[in-house]
Amino acid sequence: EPEVTQTPSHQVTQMGQEVILRCVPISNHLYFYWYRQILGQKVEFLVSFYNNEISEKSEIFDDQFSVERPDGSNFTLKIRSTKLEDSAMYFCASSLRRGEKLFFGSGTQLSVL
Amino acid sequence: AQTVTQSQPEMSVQEAETVTLSCTYDTSESDYYLFWYKQPPSRQMILVIRQEAYKQQNATENRFSVNFQKAAKSFSLKISDSQLGDAAMYFCAYSSNAGGTSYGKLTFGQGTILTVHP
């Protein structure tokens, strides 16, 4: 079965630094998402992306966050100036069509020191 | 806003037996989807089963079935003939199907850790 790939699996950064989390969605998928899971807490929706623009975002997704699909294959999440509370597992997901199954990646564990 | 509640932080079951995981949700919408996701130690989220709210028939996928009670806003997962590989965190999730809303915006419950004893 095709997979969503996320790199790196672990990322450690200093508070205030910029990080970019990378995802390669399944090649023919059209809808892309980022979620995060702080340790011990619920999985939370961050943003959805379709047709090269954000279709919906949560309150968490403030000006420090941005997403991009720079080359038609990668889907990135950028955090401009990381905070301690950004430490979490970040999941990328994709789906072929609206209403169809989401495929999740294995996540990137971000640790902000 | 929609909320999803899983009141069982942990459950356990003997191999080959049946276990039911509970989930309740709150919404004012009539058209939506409900899901159960499995998260093994690898942390990848794997879709177990999906239910469309307009369908009265309960969804089934092999050993996994749901009991969807729309009026009660209840959506439980039954795992029959439990296997060691079923051990994982299980999340219940909700997605609106209202016009203009992204299907992929899932609202998750807190999760239930399922242990399977040999």
Image (cartoon, coloured by chain):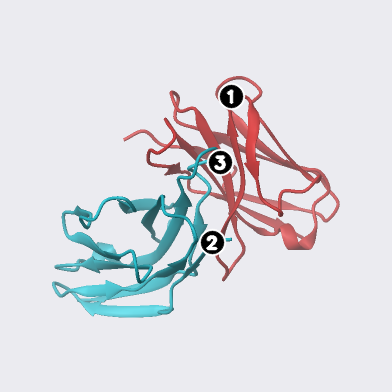
Chain colours: A red, B cyan
Query: Type of residue at label 2?
Result: Gln
Mark 2: give few (<14), some (14-19) or many (20+) Cα within 10 Å.
some
Q: Toward the viewer: A108 or B52?
A: B52
Q: Which residue is mark 2?
A: B2
Mark 2 secondary-structure assignment: loop
Left or right? Give the position of A29 relative to B74.
Answer: right
Image coordinates for residue A56, horizontal then vertical, percent: 63, 41
**Residue visible at 53% across and 61% down in the picture:** B2
Query: Type of residue at label 3?
Result: Tyr
Distance, label 3 to label 2, CA atoms, is 19 Å
Mark 1 secondary-structure assignment: loop
Name the mark on residue B108.
Answer: none
Q: Which residue is mark 3?
A: A33
For residue A96, above or below residue B72 = above
Query: Type of residue at label 1?
Result: Asn
Mark 1: give few (<14), some (14-19) or many (20+) Cα within 10 Å.
few
Image coordinates for residue A93, horizontal then vertical, percent: 50, 41
Name the mark on residue A51.
Answer: 1
Image coordinates for residue B50, horizontal then vertical, percent: 32, 51
**Residue visible at 23% across and 54% down in the picture:** B59
Residue B101 image-quadrant placement: top right
**Residue visible at 32% across and 75% down in the picture:** B115
Mark 3 secondary-structure assignment: strand
Q: Nearer the viewer, mark 1 or mark 2?
A: 2
